[in-house]
């Protein structure tokens, strides 16, 4: 089986991906301790561009076919913000960002989506492939639940009345934008 490097320092993402796609022979930062803290600058204007930047940068360091993902939350009434800046559009912790988002959404429509774009880059063939996943939903009027990370305590997926922060990992793993993107990647891989 082909080995892939999972290009992220985010322990939450690593855990999610290893659970979503356990059949893959993954290498992570744990296998390349010299890359701990390596964080290529995301200068792209889209999730796709940022995923490719990360995939190419990590592949250059590891020599392995690299899977990088860029993801975020898009709130439609805020012109799809925080978007590609989801993890850095407001300084501080996840809770600080959640509170800032609630402030920005006062008296506005709360429809949103989580989106994830995966870039698979093979450095030997200089080939890229992209896979996008999404989950539609809305933003809760207050922070609920302590599971997950990022905006999970605010995001209520369509068909549910609880946030990902309340629903927990098992439900999120079935519905998430990351699951959607990685399912498409796995289907492509097996074809």
Image: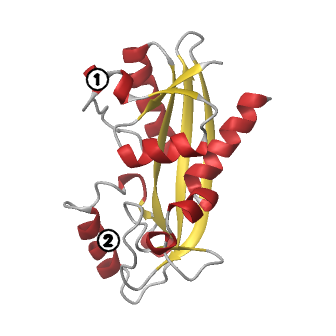
Q: Can residue 82 be seen in this view?
A: yes
Image coordinates of residue 73 in percent, x first then y, are 46, 61
* Dot 1 alpha-carbon crowd within 10 angstroms: few under 14, some 14 to 19, many 20 or more: few
- Label 2 vs 1, first from the N-terminus: 1
Q: How far apart are marks 2 and 1 (CA)?
A: 32 Å
Q: Residue 133 carries which label?
A: none
Q: Percent x, y for residue 36?
A: 27, 29
Q: Circle 1 is placed at which residue position?
A: 33
In this view, the residue in front, 159 or 22, is 22
Q: Would you call the spot at circle 2 few (<14 residues within 10 Å), some (14-19), or many (20 or more)?
A: many
Outermost residue to the bottom = 107
Q: Which residue is drawn at 35% across and 28% down?
A: 30
Number of callouts: 2
Kindly report which numbered mark, 2 or 1, lies closer to the viewer in this rendering.
Answer: 1
- Which residue corresponds to the image point at 41% horizontal and 16% vertical from the top-left? 62
> What is the x, y in percent for residue 98?
32, 71
> In the figure, residue 106 lies in which quadrant?
bottom left
> Is residue 59 or residue 110 the one in the foreground?
59
Using residue 80 as the reference point, say whether residue 104 is left or right of it.
Answer: left
How far from the left and from the top, in percent, is residue 118? 55, 39
Q: Tell me: residue 22, above or below residue 90.
A: above
Q: Which residue is drawn at 49% across and 83% down?
A: 109
Colour scheme employed for the rendering of this structure: secondary structure
Seen from this angle, which residue lies furthest left?
92
Residue linked to disc 2: 98
- 47 w.r.t. 128: above or below: below
Classify 154 as above or below 65: below
């Amino acid at each position: 089986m082909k080995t892939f490097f999972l290009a992220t320092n985010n322990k939450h993402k690593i855990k999610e991906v290893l659970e979503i796609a356990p059949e893959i022979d993954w290498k992570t930062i744990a296998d390349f301790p010299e890359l701990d803290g390596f964080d290529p600058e995301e200068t792209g204007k889209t999730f796709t561009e940022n995923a490719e930047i990360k995939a190419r940068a990590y592949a250059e360091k590891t020599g392995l076919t690299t899977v990088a993902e860029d993801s975020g939350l898009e709130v439609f009434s805020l012109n799809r913000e925080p978007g590609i800046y989801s993890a850095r559009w407001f300084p501080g912790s996840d809770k600080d960002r959640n509170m800032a988002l609630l402030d920005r959404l006062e008296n506005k429509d709360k429809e949103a989506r989580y989106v994830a774009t995966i870039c698979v880059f093979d450095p030997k063939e200089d080939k890229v492939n992209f896979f996008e996943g999404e989950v539609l939903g809305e933003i809760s009027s207050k922070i609920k639940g302590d599971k997950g990370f990022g905006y999970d305590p605010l995001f209520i997926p369509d068909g549910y009345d609880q946030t990902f922060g309340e629903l927990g990992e098992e439900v999120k793993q079935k519905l998430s934008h990351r699951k959607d993107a990685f399912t498409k990647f796995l289907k492509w891989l097996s074809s």
